[in-house]
Image: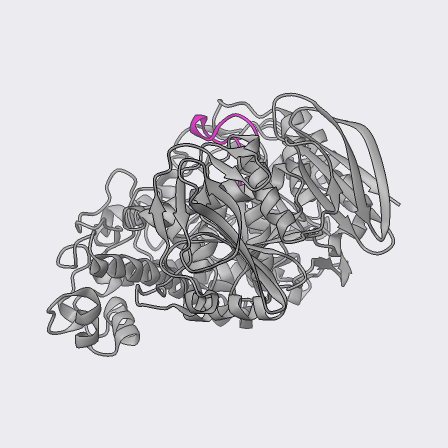
């Protein structure tokens, strides 16, 4: 019997029935062929229903023009697919061109980069990146060589597609696109690939589409170009600290984002041309890449395209040794952003071991990590990796034996991590009612994609100082909500907002007219809005846009000294505020004053059916008084709470479907926490006393 995978915005489905997608990364080119069956059965017995594997270019085309399949055990992809089909295990094929996976050249064959150095991605100075060589995705030579390879792979995959009665249910386009460029500290500036100076070049066409005429571009940049072809990014473009320089930097980031979209569109077009008629997908290397990849699913919707992200909590020493509340916020972002895109939230690489010996991966901590994702509403996951083995000759870049400290070792030993995954898998199958539910939400946290893509860091960060500051403050706001048992969910402010729930929006000076208008309509329909720390007065292109200011009747915000505490209306002091702003002309009820001079820092005012609270302060969460400040603001707007507790150290999530409910308590700290909770779910009140949550673990509580 074949298993057919489908999905919608709520969940994945197998043969039409809601089901978790539980996959394990299994590399046929590493695991000894004689062990395939045993280890695949172990995967299936753990509760998984799928397997994912790269099909590395470096393994299958060792010399240019010599594409090899099924000649040696490590290249026997056909036999591997036959076995998966026999065992009724769904397959997510990951043919590249890139694989990463600790392979040399990140999975590209060495002859490609050695013979054709012109395809290498370049930094802003035009110098090809040599220390960690990566290709420029749209270089015609790279695309030519990749097309030849993928044509061969696609031909082999085609008979095994689920649409042909086989086991391959999805094909992934490339891997962690953009990662090699951004992590190396630049956005690709390969002149030939990007089309600098050519009328038909991608960059020139991008500028023409945005500005129409070079005179209009000059007016925005403060330049004197005679044609779009004269513009050499980062060399003769405006200085960083000018408005024109900021506009250029934002334009180039949007252009780079567009090149990623074109690249994935190209790969999907090849897949379709070669007869691959299953769902396509790709993965964001970290959640922070989702904003710059957000348009890819829509632009490939004719192919049924889903997007997921990779989540690792202890991959390198610099990433820490365990889960933290801050990482929990980032994974919450990932789930919410994917939901905003209409995707069933998926972790296409869920940490399952590590390529590093330090920090070690403990099964107890890993189980907490997995269950935290269940608590957030994750619908699909792929454990990376489930098992490993010897690297094919001259292909590994850091070890000869790719063991990865995985749940099943390179020699077939079953480790305690296997039991942790099996336990989580069994929970997901047993609590199958959660599969179609989303987290209960008391508070909406508003985001807008343009701001997010500028606050995730990377090489454009020096052009977005305000944005980066806003990003860190936004992280602190969500951390405060999370640890304060406020059930929040991030919502795109350009989309559908629920006026019955309060909305917090952290914003800087820029916000598009459409999004400002959407917030105005939210308030007019009875919504309660918290804007912090300033009211935007520019659009995304740094042009005047005062829709919100005019609606609120507020003048330009002014920053005052951040020294000293502020004083809440109830008399409580709030310390360690990083920035303080005033809102002349708003005329609301004062909630927070600067202690030193009495200046108003937060005001609330009823406007028609709705209400607006302006909070002119930022903080990086470290003091309970900062949590008290945010709670005071929410309470001032009449925000109801579904969970009441004095606990300030656990993250709380809640699910309900009218018949049953479940609350998750997530402890991402190195000590046990005990506290009591009053919960409202399905119209009932539940009192839960003296609940203990061990360190780095998750407790689930059924509410019936």
* Highlighted range, magenta: 311-323
Q: Residue at x 83, y 34 (%)?
A: 688
Residue 265 % position (x, y): 43, 66
Inspect this view and state whether residue 45 appears: yes
Image quarter of the N terminus: bottom right
Q: Most prominent secondary structure in the magenta stretch?
A: loop
Q: Is residue 575 left or right of residue 679?
A: left
Q: Is residue 138 left or right of residue 200?
A: right
Image quarter of the C terminus: top right
Residue 241 % position (x, y): 20, 51
User: From what the image shows, is residue 288 above or below residue 556?
Assistant: above
In the image shown, does 382 or 53 lie closer to the viewer?
382
Q: Residue at x 74, y 53 (%)?
A: 435
Inspect this view and state whether residue 274 appears: no
In the image shown, does 250 or 41 lie closer to the viewer?
250
| Snapshot colouring | one colour
Q: Is residue 332 left or right of residue 689?
A: left
Residue 278 % position (x, y): 60, 65
Splitting the image into 4 quarters, where does residue 149 fall?
bottom left
């Amino acid at each position: 019997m074949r298993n057919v995978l489908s999905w919608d915005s709520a969940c994945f489905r197998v043969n039409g029935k809601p089901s978790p997608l539980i996959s394990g990364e299994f590399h046929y080119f590493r695991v000894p062929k004689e062990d395939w069956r045993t280890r695949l059965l172990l995967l299936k017995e753990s509760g998984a229903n799928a397997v994912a594997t790269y099909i590395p270019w470096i393994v299958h085309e060792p010399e240019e023009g010599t594409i090899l399949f099924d000649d040696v055990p490590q290249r026997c992809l056909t036999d591997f697919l036959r076995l998966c089909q026999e065992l009724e295990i769904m397959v997510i094929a990951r043919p590249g061109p890139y694989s990463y996976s600790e392979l040399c050249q990140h999975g590209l064959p060495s002859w490609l980069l050695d013979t054709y150095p012109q395809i290498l991605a370049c930094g802003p100075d035009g110098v090809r990146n040599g220390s960690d060589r990566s290709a420029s995705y749209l270089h015609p030579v790279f695309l030519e060589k990749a097309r030849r390879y993928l044509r061969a792979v696609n031909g082999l995959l085609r008979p095994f597609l689920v649409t042909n009665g086989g086991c391959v249910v999805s094909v992934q386009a490339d891997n962690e696109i953009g990662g090699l460029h951004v992590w190396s500290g630049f956005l690709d500036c390969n002149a030939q690939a990007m089309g600098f100076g050519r009328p038909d070049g991608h960059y020139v066409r991008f500028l023409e589409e945005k500005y129409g005429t070079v005179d209009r571009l000059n007016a925005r940049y403060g330049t004197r170009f005679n044609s779009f072809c004269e513009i050499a990014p980062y060399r003769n473009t405006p200085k960083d600290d000018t408005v024109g320089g900021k506009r250029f930097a934002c334009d180039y980031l949007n252009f780079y984002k567009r090149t990623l979209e074109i690249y994935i569109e190209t790969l999907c077009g090849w897949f379709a041309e070669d007869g691959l008629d299953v769902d396509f997908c790709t993965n964001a290397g970290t959640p922070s890449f989702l904003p710059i990849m957000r348009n890819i699913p829509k632009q490939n919707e004719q192919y049924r395209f889903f997007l997921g992200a990779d989540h690792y909590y202890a991959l390198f020493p610099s990433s820490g040794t365990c889960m933290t509340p801050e990482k929990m916020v980032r994974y919450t972002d990932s789930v919410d952003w994917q939901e905003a895109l209409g995707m069933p939230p998926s972790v296409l690489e869920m940490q399952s071991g590590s390529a590093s010996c330090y920090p070690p991966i403990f099964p107890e901590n890993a189980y907490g990590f997995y269950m935290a994702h269940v608590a957030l509403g994750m619908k699909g996951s792929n454990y990376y990796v489930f098992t490993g083995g010897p690297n094919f000759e001259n292909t590994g870049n850091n070890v000869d034996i790719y063991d990865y400290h995985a749940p099943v070792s390179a020699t077939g030993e079953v480790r305690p991590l296997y039991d942790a995954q099996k336990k989580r898998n069994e929970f997901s199958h047993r609590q199958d009612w959660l599969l179609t539910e989303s987290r209960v939400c008391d508070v909406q946290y508003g985001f807008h994609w343009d701001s997010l893509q500028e606050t995730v860091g990377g090489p454009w960060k020096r052009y977005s100082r305000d944005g980066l500051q806003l990003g860190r403050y936004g992280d602190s706001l969500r951390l405060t909500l999370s640890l304060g048992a406020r059930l929040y969910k991030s919502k795109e402010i350009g989309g559908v907002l629920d006026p019955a729930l309060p909305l917090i929006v952290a914003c800087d000076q820029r916000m598009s007219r459409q999004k400002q208008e959407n917030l105005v309509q939210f308030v007019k329909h009875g919504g309660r809005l918290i804007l912090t720390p300033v009211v935007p007065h520019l659009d995304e292109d740094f042009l005047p846009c005062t829709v919100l200011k005019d609606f609120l009747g507020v003048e330009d915000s002014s920053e005052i000294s951040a020294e000293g505490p502020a004083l809440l209306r109830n008399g409580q002091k709030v310390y360690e505020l990083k920035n303080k702003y005033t809102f002349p002309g708003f005329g609301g009820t004062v909630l927070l004053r600067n202690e030193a001079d009495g200046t108003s820092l937060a005001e609330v005012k009823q406007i028609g059916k709705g209400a607006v609270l302006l909070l002119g302060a930022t903080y990086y969460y470290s003091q309970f008084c900062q949590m008290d400040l945010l709670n005071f603001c929410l309470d001032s707007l009449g925000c109801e709470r579904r969970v009441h507790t004095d606990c300030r150290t656990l993250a709380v999530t809640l699910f309900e479907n009218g018949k049953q409910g479940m609350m998750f308590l997530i402890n991402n700290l190195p000590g046990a926490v005990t506290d009591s909770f009053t919960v409202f779910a399905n119209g009932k009140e539940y009192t839960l006393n003296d609940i203990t949550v061990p360190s780095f673990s998750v407790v689930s509580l059924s509410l019936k």
